Image: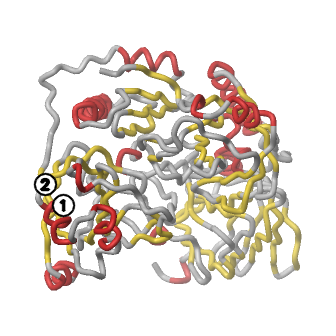
């Protein structure tokens, strides 16, 4: 490709943990490869809908501080989802951008994604397709197992992000949405719930836990009242799913997130319901959370409601 | 053969095959795993076999717990449905630079290092499961006199290729990860190959592993 025909972003600053993500990869737990994929699926879905992209198109996910990108190529639109502060730097000047709104970029323009606000993850994409390689049907980068494009590593300075396709029939769109937050995390009791003393079971649901800094795409470590194990601090290693809350030998909860190890040997006290996962991952270190017990039937209904809400938001894009 | 099916959260079945760890129970788990995998059921997003459990993750938009549970309960696997087993030979170098915990193992087992290694290499091992990190095989069973606990404080970084033991099991670290197993050596062989997307794992559940000992020169030769 001649360089004048290229459309690409150059990374001036990479941000803290910037990766390509899509819906992730299925049916590989048995060889030790987790789902991965965008942490917050609702914001992933909204972004691709806003940009009229395919529902599983690759997007750029960032955490806390995002990348600073400089664009080279023909006119293009971009959009950001999540609760994000960013600046658009053009020859005319610098403006503050709003999430869930599409903006035009011309050759030489820059987008400086300063930070996510009171949340962890944000998403960036364009009305087109990034040039990514696929591994087991997904372009999601899993940095722990070094799987995905960019050698399975997070973005670094000077990396060039190729755009292989631009949708020319695109019309600028937007969504009025302020995001949705949560303090009570709803869970279903786990398969080892009876490993814990009655007073610890009560504490688990009555007291609050603080999210520690030891949280990333693999897991979220919490601190709070110690959960006392009265049976065995270990179980025979068995499969995990995202949202499982294990209690470590030290008595602290750890929640499995999208890049988690596929098997583990700590007892499972509970599992976060699917309807609350997107909002759970957006909680920042230092936040306090409380767990609330719900039945399996309620969890299934709550998930349907959550999906209806997402679809409703998509229908409001104009 | 499945004793009980519970839910693990709202999007996974937890199939319980028993509480013991032995090859008979594990072979049942693996049989179900391969059988269900072959069915290619729509909306099944993951199958995770382990020593005595099989976890079936599903898409909540397609299945509910009760309907999928019924489907799985109705599965009948004929007895003649044999497991495919491969014998895989894996070279291991036990040079001092690789056998990070040999001194500790000598002290705990009260055996000389040569005896420990002789016992370790004299046996074939069965692969119960792979996972935790990509491609890591969980193998067993070690001889009774070879069994010891994990390190009191896990290593922050276990080198890639390390071969470790704990309790009745041994494993191979396919990536540099944290870990607490007692390391006896290192293999130059790549156990997980990202570029081979159809079959990235050298070792799969149900396979048999034979470790054989190599010198440092042979190790370097294979690495090269």
Label ID, residue B123: 2
Residue density around tag 2, few if under 14, some if 14–19, many if 20 or more, within 10 Å: some
Q: Residue at x 46, y 29 (%)?
A: B14
Residues under labels 1 and 2: Cα distance?
6 Å
Residues under numbered marks 1 and 2 in contact, where contact means CB atoms less than 8 Å apart: yes
The residue identified by callout 1 is B120
Q: Quadrant of residue B53?
A: top left
User: Is B102 displayed left or right of B57 in the figure?
Assistant: left
Residue name at image x 37 percent, y 20 percent: B3
The x, y position of residue B89, in whole percent, is 13, 60
Above or below residue A93? Residue B101 is above
Q: Is residue A151 above or below residue A272?
A: below
Residue at x-position 70% and y-position 51%: A222
The x and y percentages for residue A210 are 78, 51
Subunit under mark 2 = B
- For residue A212, the mark is none
The image position of residue A277, as x and y in percent, is: 67, 41
> Disc 1 sits on a residue from what chain?
B
User: Quick one: B112 or B87, which is closer to the camera?
Assistant: B112
> Can residue A32 be seen at all in this image of the molecule?
yes
In front of the other: A42 or A167: A42
Quadrant housing residue A187: top right
Query: Where in the figure is residue A155, as x and y percent of width and height?
Result: 58, 73
Q: Secondary structure at mark 1?
A: helix
- Tag 1: Cα neighbours inside 10 Å, few (<14), some, or many (≥20)? many
Number of numbered discs visible in the structure rendering: 2
């Amino acid at each position: 490709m001649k360089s004048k025909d290229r459309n690409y972003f150059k990374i001036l600053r990479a941000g803290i943990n910037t990766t390509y993500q899509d819906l992730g990869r299925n049916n590989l737990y048995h060889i030790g490869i987790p789902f991965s994929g965008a942490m917050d699926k609702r914001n992933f879905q909204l972004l691709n809908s806003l940009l009229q992209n395919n529902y599983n198109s690759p997007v750029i996910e960032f955490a806390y501080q995002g990348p600073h990108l400089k664009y080279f190529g023909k006119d293009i639109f971009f959009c950001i989802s999540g609760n994000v502060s960013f600046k658009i730097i053009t020859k005319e000047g610098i403006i503050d951008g709003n999430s869930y709104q599409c903006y035009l970029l011309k050759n030489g323009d820059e987008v400086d994604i300063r930070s996510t606000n009171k949340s962890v993850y944000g998403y960036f994409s364009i009305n087109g397709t990034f040039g990514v390689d696929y591994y087991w049907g997904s372009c999601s980068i899993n940095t722990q197992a070094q799987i995905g494009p960019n050698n399975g590593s997070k973005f670094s300075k000077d990396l060039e992000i190729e755009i292989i396709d631009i949708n020319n029939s695109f019309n600028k769109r937007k969504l009025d949405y302020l995001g949705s937050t949560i303090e009570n995390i709803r869970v279903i009791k786990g398969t080892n719930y009876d490993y814990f003393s009655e007073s610890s079971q009560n504490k688990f649901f009555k007291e609050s836990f603080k999210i520690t800094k030891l949280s990333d795409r693999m897991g979220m470590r919490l601190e709070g009242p110690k959960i006392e194990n009265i049976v065995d601090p270990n179980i025979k290693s068995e499969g995990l799913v995202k949202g499982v809350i294990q209690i470590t030998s030290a008595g602290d909860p750890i929640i499995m997130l999208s890049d988690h190890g596929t098997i583990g040997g700590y007892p499972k006290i509970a599992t976060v319901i699917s309807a609350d996962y997107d909002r759970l991952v957006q909680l920042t270190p230092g936040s306090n959370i409380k767990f609330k017990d719900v039945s399996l039937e309620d969890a299934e209904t709550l998930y349907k409601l959550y999906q209806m809400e997402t679809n409703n938001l998509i229908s409001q894009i104009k | 053969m499945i004793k009980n099916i519970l839910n693990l959260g709202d999007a996974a079945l937890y199939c319980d095959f028993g509480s013991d760890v032995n090859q008979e129970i594990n072979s049942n788990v693996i049989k179900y795993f391969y059988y269900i995998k072959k069915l290619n059921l729509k909306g099944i997003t993951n199958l995770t076999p382990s020593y005595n459990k099989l976890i079936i993750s599903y898409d909540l938009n397609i299945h509910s717990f009760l309907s999928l549970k019924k489907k799985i309960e109705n599965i009948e696997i004929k007895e003649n449905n044999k497991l495919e087993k491969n014998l895989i030979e894996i070279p291991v170098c036990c040079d001092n630079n690789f056998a990070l915990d040999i001194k500790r193992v000598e002290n705990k087992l009260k055996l000389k290092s040569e005896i420990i290694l002789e016992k370790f290499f004299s046996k074939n091992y069965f692969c119960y499961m792979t996972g935790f990190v990509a491609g890591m095989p969980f193998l067993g069973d070690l001889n009774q006199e070879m069994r010891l606990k994990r390190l009191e404080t896990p290593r922050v970084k276990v080198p890639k290729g390390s071969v470790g033991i704990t309790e009745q099991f041994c494993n191979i670290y396919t990536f540099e990860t944290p870990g607490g197993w007692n390391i006896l050596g290192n293999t130059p062989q790549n156990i997980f190959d990202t570029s081979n997307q159809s079959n990235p794992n050298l070792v799969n559940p149900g396979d048999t592993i034979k470790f054989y000992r190599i010198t440092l020169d042979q190790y370097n030769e294979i690495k090269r």
